Image (tube, rainbow, N blue to C red):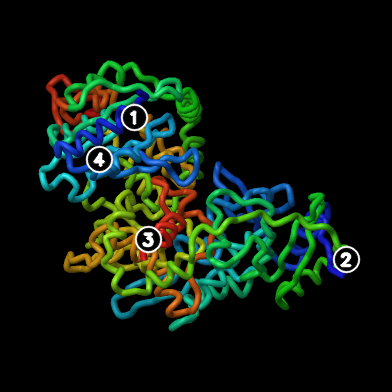
Amino acid sequence: MTRILLRNKLDDCIAAWQKAGFSVLAPVKRHEMSSFGEVQKSGDMALDLILTERTIKDQFFPQTEPLIKYKIGKQQIDSETMTPPEKKRVFFGVRPCDASGLAIDDPLFGWDYKDDYWFRRRDNSVIVTIACAQADDFCMCTSVKLSPDSAKGADVLLRPLLEGSGWQIEVFTERGKALLEIVSSLLLEGNGHTFPLPQVPEKFDLEKVMAWLGDKENFESQFWKDIALRCVGCGSCTFLCPTCHCFDIQDEGDTYQGIRRKNWDSCSFALFTMHTSGHNPRNTQSTRWRQRIMHKFNYYRGKFGVNSCSGCGRCTRQCPVDMGITETLQAITNLPR
Amino acid sequence: MGIQEQYRSEAAALLSSGEVKLVIGFGAGSTADRRRPLFARTPEEAEKFVLDAACIANLSTYLVAEGLLSDGKKVGVFLKPDGIRSVNILISEAQLKPEQVVILGYAIENGKDVVPLEGCNISDFSIGEKIRSHTPPTHVIEAAEKIEAMSAEERFEFWKEEFAKCIKCYACRQVCPMCYCRRCIVDVNQPQWVSTSSHTLGNFEWNLVRAFHLAGRCAACGACDRACPVNIPLRLVNYRMGKEVRSAFDYVAGENSDQKPVLASFKQDDPETFIL
């Protein structure tokens, strides 16, 4: 027997979670932009969106994050480490691709150094994924071996009921179990008919792509120059990506005091690899685009055993010149072998 | 013959005669309603060009791509009036040589009909009058008027909320034909002149720097607005700056390629109301 969360109990759940010390975050649409934001009631949630424009990553790895406050005196330097807020959070209505993105990035942030800023937030957060009921032309989770009901990165997975009255619950972690414990009196026992999963066609052959990328001969292929010709070199694909994680450390302030910050950075930018000497090893957009694809589907996998893409499709969906991972990997799939 | 077929064969002819090394136009996109920039180097590739009412991007931005025109060879490009206007501005700012660009001009009328614009060199297109009398879409004017009617505090709040969305992806800059600096001021990092942080102050810095730098230079193509992944109504900023420049100097950017850049030139009868 599984349990069911009814839509009309959602407000009570939010209240119960808040009472237990959680902030509740969900997809919201504010100022013509959709993202994850704090909500007070179910009416604030935009659960019908296929996907928010901004990713959930922002809530774990913000675009700018203060690390240290410092003051340089005559004889000494005072510094104060700044830490992210400790409050417990529930993320309600995360899409499987976004939740997977978090799981994909975990090994990166915990590799040679445990990034406290990421893990404090991860440890304080419970991810409640809702399986997709719809997909658009850009969704490509199935192409990267995930699915519209993938539980990767999820503590709880909800499947929408056919009649729209609520969700069927699956729990995967202790954290998820504890979250549901808080609202157990609000849940129903039972089985409902769940909404059929949307058909997300496979758009490229991942195995073929990985083999081609792994072949060193192809690093200097003309393919990269041709495919990247129209790339204008903005960072929108990287900043809207649920797994892109590159950052820069900047000191902001004057000679005597300031704040050290961790700011998003993007391999699409020429400045990303610019050396102090002025030499730039990735001096054309094609080398930068190659880096992005290689990093996601070759290097990252080599290091962490997983591709750095969860198939959300935002890169293509939002690209000003209609290019992204899908069509690049499609083109690689179709290259003559 | 429809305009698409006509322009395909014109592009193919330009390529096969060797007059141009490359034609920049539109091809089919990843969905039925999308078009993407397409670069044709052979007459066969020119057969893939698509030209219809969905071809709204301003392709002139590629003309200032690093290295594209440095070999002195000509390039053909599909341009709407806003693209032609951009080319005028780029020529007047000495970023392009008029003889290097062959224009395949077209206009989209009533949002659906694509009609050819006669000519191929920039001097063939007299768009000055059209630009002067052009009125932006009603929704742009309405939105701009709404903001202008606000008090200074309300206006500040409005832009604060809009700029709070900015993630500094610089898509607005990268799609803009007028943002051709090889190193943008925000990328000058020895020392870092403008903060890279995407917080309220940093986002204001970036968006204001861009607004100032585009004053009297914007071709009003709306590329920044469309490119913005977080939907900041950027064209309203540039629309307002254009209005300011027009009222102060009776100057409309891109009327022709002989125009002197308004903020880089001086006329004895320029108003000097800013001098107390």
Q: Residue furthest bottom?
A: A112
Relative placement, left or right, of A271 versus A118 is left
Residue occupying the point 31% across, 27% down: B6
Residue occupying the point 24% across, 65% down: A274
Residue B219 position in % (x across, y down): 30, 31
> Label 1 vs label 2: CA separation?
68 Å
Do the dots labelled 4 and 2 sit on one chain?
no
Q: Secondary structure at mark 4?
A: helix
Q: Label 2 sits on what residue type?
A: Ser
Q: Which residue is mark 1?
A: B5
In-front residue for pair B53/A28: B53
Residue A335's label in the rendered image is 3
Mark 4: few/some/many CA within 10 Å (<14, 14-19, 20+): many
Residue B136 position in % (x across, y down): 41, 24
Do the dots labelled 4 and 3 sit on one chain?
no
Q: Which residue is mark 4?
A: B43
Residue A185's label in the rendered image is 2
Q: Secondary structure at mark 3?
A: loop
Q: Is residue B175 above or below residue B266?
A: below
Read off the chain for label 4. Answer: B
Q: Is residue B265 above or below residue B209?
A: above
Residue A134's label in the rendered image is none
> Label 4 vs label 2: CA separation?
71 Å
